[in-house]
Image: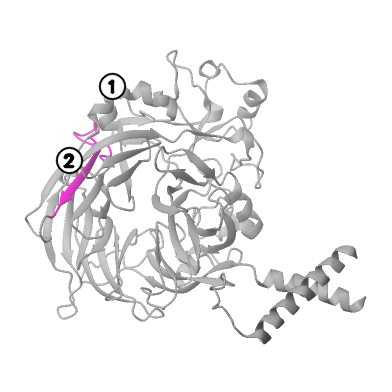
Amino acid sequence: MAFIVFACVAIVVVVAADAYDVKLTKRSTAYIPDHYYPNATPHYGIFGGSADRTGYDHSNKIVYVAGGTLLHAIDVSDPDNMTIVAHVEMAGVDFTDVEVCGGHVFTAIDDKANRTNGRVIIYSAYNATSMSIPEVLQIPVGAVPDMIKPTKDCSQLIVAVEGEAYENPPNQITDPQGLVVIINFPNTINSSYTKTSLDFTKFNDRVTELRPSGVRHVYQENGNPFSNDVEPEYVALNADETIAYVVLQENNAVATVDLVNQNITGVHGLGFKDWSKLTLDPSDKDRGAFQYPYSVMGMYLTDSAVYFRFKGVDYLLMANEGDAKDYKFGTYKWSEEEKAGKLSESILPTLDATTRDQLTRDTLLGRLTVSVSPAGKNSSGNLEALYAYGGRSFSIRRTDDMSLVYDSGDDLARRLYVNNKDLFNGHLGDVSHRPFEDFDLRSRSKGMETEAVETGEVEGRTLLFVANERPGTIFVYSLDTDVMKPEFHDIYSGIPDTRTRSWQEMYDDRQLSEIDCEDIKFVAGDKSPTGKPVLFVTGSVTGTLSIINVDVTNPPPKPAKPSSSAASLTRELTFAVVTATVVYLCGRM
């Protein structure tokens, strides 16, 4: 009997040891200056905003990091000692994105002095001889460009021009058109290009038709049309690069763009999330992570999205961060945000008695930030529901109809609390605080704010990486047989200490990194500076670029070659019979 018990334990250990698993561990971090003036002296600091987006030149092992007024080239050939080798600094602008293609570096520029003068600036790759990043070409694209996406052959560049509202003239608002700009390079990347700007005016008369799917026309003051309210934010391309999926974050929608015929073919609403069927912590005054169902609808308001194919079907992996429109320009003020407890009962006629009571309590729904935009009101001016910001989750949607096939629900919040409760819905509120003192601050707003997503193929599985901004975590899941059943593996954080040191002390010790995880890029082992799969992760608040190892244990075995050895076959059959016998006896015990 002792032998049988030992065998049972042994088999359990073998089965457990064979489980596929993924772990994320930091390899190194580079701290990036937020300015070099005066006297070309590098200056570092929290909230500098020097690291938003990345582009990777795997041939030369150079990572380009864009953020604020700066574009940096960082040599990562020695992954344990990343080195800044060049930078470009432009006063009065904001570098909003960077991509690398065909020996060129594409950047998007928001001109703060003249918001209509947004442009794409193209550079040559880092020149090691001159230690510079030479400029090649500037292309005007419109007001406030956000993301750029080149095709694999670099012949086409898709630009999401957000058209975010700004002050002009003083104390007034200008809300320019949101655009999708397609730039074609018929020969090489030079001044011989064509540009097509696509707007959303043809959807202005279709807002009522689109609204039931979740599409939002948020800012309607002074007759502002949908085509100006719409804000293209993020771009993903399908496998053959004939379709662009453009996320319209504040509008809770995704636009599909035909890149061959160069026209916008549809605007697809993302619907709403019913928190009465899940659990939510809506308060920063409840002194804990108390999650319960509430009669609240979550607006997904996706930020980033990446395309992937799984078992022959095309999907988008989406980060449901949430975002609101809030304008404060001199004496002009307009906001769609309000505390739920301040809502007048007259605009919420359908609420049940329990929810009405919860609105009076700051430890329940009283402090939850909700929308009072016309986008959520009926013809009588009443809110159709309590609409909260963000899905506090990641989603998977089919690209053919944007139907939701999976949403992580409340899984991220639950797992983070178990893994590290000090970081639950946290936020760097005061640099002198220790992280646990800023616990729960964002519960009333958008929770952990799922900011960025990425996919990667490692050892036979599709990995899903989900980065959260409050206060900086990355979750990793994998897909095996069913896209509707992601398997959780690990949570990474760039915050090494939550109890004994402050945010500032950890930053000064050069140990605090990516507490807001603005961008993540997966790099396969054959292109990685480490020779193994990694993530490049930026943190805008910390001004950091980190290399994160993606370590896979017990991957699926590669198919073995057929053996003609009788002895080998006998050993295999013997092991199989013994295993089956022990499993049977274990079941009888």
Q: Bounds of the magenta span? A: 163-185
Q: Nearer the viewer, residue 298 or 167?
A: 298
The question of residue 174 being in magenta is answered with: yes
Amino acid of disc 1: Asp
Q: Is residue 451 above or below residue 504?
A: above
Which corner quadrant holds the C terminus?
Answer: bottom right
Residue appearing at x 20%, y 41% in the figure: 262
Tell me the number on the disc at residue 197.
2
Q: Does residue 379 appear in the picture of this structure?
A: yes
Secondary structure beneath dot 1 equals helix
| Image coords of residue 271 (percent x, y) | 47, 33
Please name the residue that numbered disc 1 is placed on.
205
Amino acid of disc 2: Ser
Q: Is residue 552 above or below residue 429?
A: below
Secondary structure beneath dot 2 equals strand
Q: Does residue 49 appear in the picture of this structure?
A: no
